[in-house]
Image: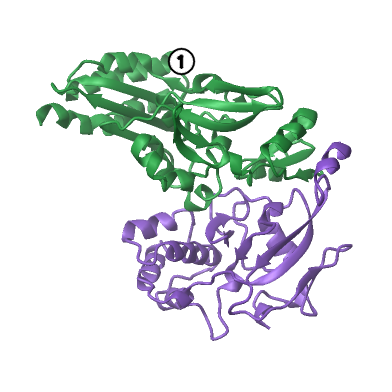
Chain colours: A green, B purple
Amino acid sequence: MTEMKYYRPETLEQALDFLDAHGARTEILAGGTDVMVDVRSGVLHKETLLDVSRLAALKKIEMTDAGLCVGSGVTLSEINTSPLIKKYAPALGKCSETFASRQIRNIATIGGNVAHASPCGDTIPPLVIHEARAVVANQNGVKEISMDAIAAGAYQSALAAGDIIVKFILKPREAGFADFQKIARRRALAISRMTMAVMADKDEAGKICFVRFSLGACTPTPHRMDAVESFLMGQNPTHELLRGAGTLLAEKMVEITGRRSSIIYKEPAVQGLFMRMMYPMVGWCEK
Amino acid sequence: MGQSVNRRVTKKMDQKKVDIQFTLNAQKTSVRIPVEMTALQVIRDVVGFKGSKEGCGIGECGACTIEVDGKAINSCLMCGVQLDGREVLTIEGLEREEGLHPIQETFLEHHAVQCGFCTPGILMSTHALLKENPAPDDEEIRDAVSGNLCRCTGYQQIFSSIKAATPVKDDSFFHTGDAENTLKKSQVFADETSSSMVLNGTKKGENNGEGCHD
């Protein structure tokens, strides 16, 4: 166990000052649910833990002109109980219900989940369908990074050493249909093998007039599945249509990942999970 | 690196050992700990309360569950320094002067304890649930303890025990974590050089986790 130092800034400015000087040798600590596992197993070799868990600037959920803002330091439990999230980002709310366990939801943060850049971060597909932008601060100012650019690869964040994610700005939408589904070895806690998030609306004729869909965990970085969205747009959500979309989704997944050994399982699983998630939409055209 | 930090921050920053103060089972507690230490290690190895268990050490089994500011958390996943200023409740703080906590009683009545390794964690998850929601439905009970593994009971007895404890009608059911209430105050302090704990004059080795009421 290497000896580390600890710094708990009082303000975001202090945190940014510190990172400006020591960013490369510093690990940002929020909930700690990923960081402490790495500390314990000895794979984290940083000089200092910068504890941002008490920075009020990172903990707000609010609706602004720019969109629905979710602070990076907001815990999954706070997301789960937020009326704003429930109304304007229901798939994210659904994701927070099944995220790990109660104990982890109580301290794990959405910013940590994204910054960790695990392909199987549960919050990522819901953020992708809301076309979220991460507001990232550093000593030089503030920039916005889209969700598809925030991960450079599996477990490789695109953030620079001096960067802190301050918040996410989501395009709010009270969608007629929204859901999040995942497959993992057990319902609580297990790392997701496959996640997906969707939101959709229908027009007066019952045809799909708006749809956002994202697949998580199966691909190294987050993806909005444009091909699946265009396949569904303007159509009646029939059983056959969804089956076709599920097949297309599996094809697209293989295009991205190549045919890996897990494909024998994943190909039918991704279709099955897609059908399970989307099936409530079939009722739309019959009502 | 030290200079730029000390310029702005007055205490306990940029040190390899950090002084923290927190309320542990209604007692003010001060310890000096290394930064890498988890909250679980602080509680077990520094303070000497052995009720919270380490099963997996990576947040999967829930045996280390404690309450921090009233919320159930995995103490193996929390950096020990983050306990600073918090109110912490462990299994040792659940028991009252008059005897076992009502949830502990229902666990006994319904045979929810076999090997007992998971029990402290499950009791803490249960206590946190009932504090937040005194009348949980079946699904809410299952969700609240789904982060706790038990390899003995098959969970049904645990579920029945929690069910039997609900709905909670009496506020005194819960520990508030307030240092002034049920437990008598006693000063806990750490010997900075050896980091061994002295509790009311009792060496930590003599304290099996139940002596905190004395």
Q: Give the residue drawn at x 48%, y 29%.
A: A169
Q: In the rendered image of this protein, does residue B94 appear above or below residue A49? A: below
Q: Secondary structure at mark 1?
A: helix
Q: Give the residue drawn at x 53%, y 72%.
A: B175
Question: Which percent across, then down, holds residue B139?
Answer: 33, 56
Taking the image as shown, residue A194 lies to the left or right of residue B65, namely left
Question: Which percent across, then down, holds residue A42?
Answer: 73, 41
Residue at the limit of the structure toward the bottom, as seen here = B98
Position of the N terminus of chain A, as image quadrant, is: top right
Question: Which percent across, then down, holds residue A107?
Answer: 56, 48
Image quadrant assignment for residue A111:
top right
Q: Give the number of marks.
A: 1
Question: Which percent across, then down, holds residue B23?
Answer: 66, 66
Taking the image as shown, residue A222 lies to the left or right of residue A273, namely right
Position of the C terminus of chain A, as image quadrant, is: top left
Residue at the limit of the structure toward the front, as seen here = A65
Query: Which residue position holds label 1?
Result: A256
Q: In the rendered image of this protein, does residue B40 appear above or below residue A195? A: below
Q: Identify residue type, mark 1.
A: Ile
Q: Give the residue drawn at x 58%, y 79%.
A: B182
Residue at the limit of the structure toward the left, as seen here = A286
Residue B21 seen anywhere in this rendered image of the structure: yes
Residue B48 seen anywhere in this rendered image of the structure: no
* Front residue (pair B59, A125): A125
Taking the image as shown, residue A197 lies to the left or right of residue B62, namely left
Q: In the rendered image of this protein, does residue A206 appear above or below residue B98? A: above
Image quadrant assignment for residue A43:
top right
Taking the image as shown, residue A123 lies to the left or right of residue B141, namely right
| Label 1: chain letter | A
Task: Bin the neighbour count of mark 1 within 10 Å (Cα to Cα): few under 14, some 14-19, many 20 and up.
Answer: few
Image quadrant assignment for residue A34:
top right
